[in-house]
Image (tube, grey):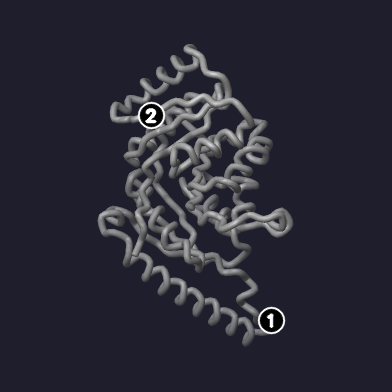
Amino acid sequence: MLTDPSFKNIAIGIAFSPTLEANVSEAARLSCMLGAKLLLIHVGKGSPEKIQIIDQFIGNCNQSQLSYELVFKEGEPVDVILEAVQEYHIDLLLLGALKKEKFVKFYLGSIARKITRKATCSVLLITNPSVVRKPCKHVVVNSLKDTHTERTIGTAFYVAHSLGSNQLTIVEEIEDQKISIKIDDDQSLRKANLLKEKLKRQEESRVRGILSHIPEEQKEGIFIETQAIFGKRGYSIGHYAQIVRADLLVMNGPKKYTFLSRFFPHDLEYILKELPTDVLIVR
């Protein structure tokens, strides 16, 4: 049975930079569409001027039903945001970054990646925040054989339904090593292709079982497709999401990061190196 995939409390870390209005606008719209309360976290001192700017941007969003709170906290950005996530019982943390900005690699490496590794809640990385809403038409979600995957797919449908998406693709990344057949003639090639088809059928059967647990109202109006791809996990689905121009990629959150993760990267590390689109990491 699926657990409740909804988000009740959403937070976003904000800085008074050129992207502030876009990030506030994205967070306000998303909170209203998901029916959640919004917490805006600024790492630094508060002031009447800063509060006025935020209130003005919130007002410009025309989200009359939005419930929000603005918090100012001083300290190290990663620590402050993670502490706020715990203190305010946040379900979903938004992190915004513009790909075109020169500091994006530094930002993703020093802040967003650390927060993504340590956060106890789901994280949404927004690559191109905008004051004017860009429709989320196509959602891609992983279907790794994992105990957490059913919740991830359920969350993908919940978000797709809430955002008015009309297409959702469930992707299984099958590692090439599972095709342990050396191809050196037509017969071995045929065996490899037969094995691939068998693996695809097994995946489709497993996914159908998960889909049977998704509420019908959340599937209504959404074209559902399954897609098996062969290659390195994390890298392959990121590349696929980029090729099909997905608006949102939904992934399982890592079970646990360790020191060795730096040398043997989790699937998400390939995604975080170069975000193919907006990425929702479900915990």
**Frontmost residue, 255 versus 35:** 255
Relative to 65, residue 232 above or below: below
Instruction: Indicate the secondary structure of the residue bearing disc 2.
Output: strand
Q: Position of residue 131 (x, y in %)?
A: 44, 27
Q: Residue at x 32, y 54 (%)?
A: 222
Amino acid of disc 2: Tyr
Quarter of image, res 217: bottom left
Quarter of image, res 177: bottom right
Q: Position of residue 11 (x, y in %)?
A: 46, 36
Q: Residue at x 48, y 52 (%)?
A: 282
Amino acid of disc 1: Lys
Q: Residue at x 61, y 76 (%)?
A: 178
**Mark 1 / mark 2, whichever is N-terminal:** 2
Quarter of image, res 9: top left
Relative to 119, residue 38 above or below: above
Callout 1 crowding tier (Cα within 10 Å): few <14, some 14–19, many ≥20: few
Q: Residue furthest front?
A: 87
| Residue behind mark 2 | 68
**Frontmost residue, 153 versus 98:** 153
| Residue behind mark 1 | 182
- Mark number, residue 276: none
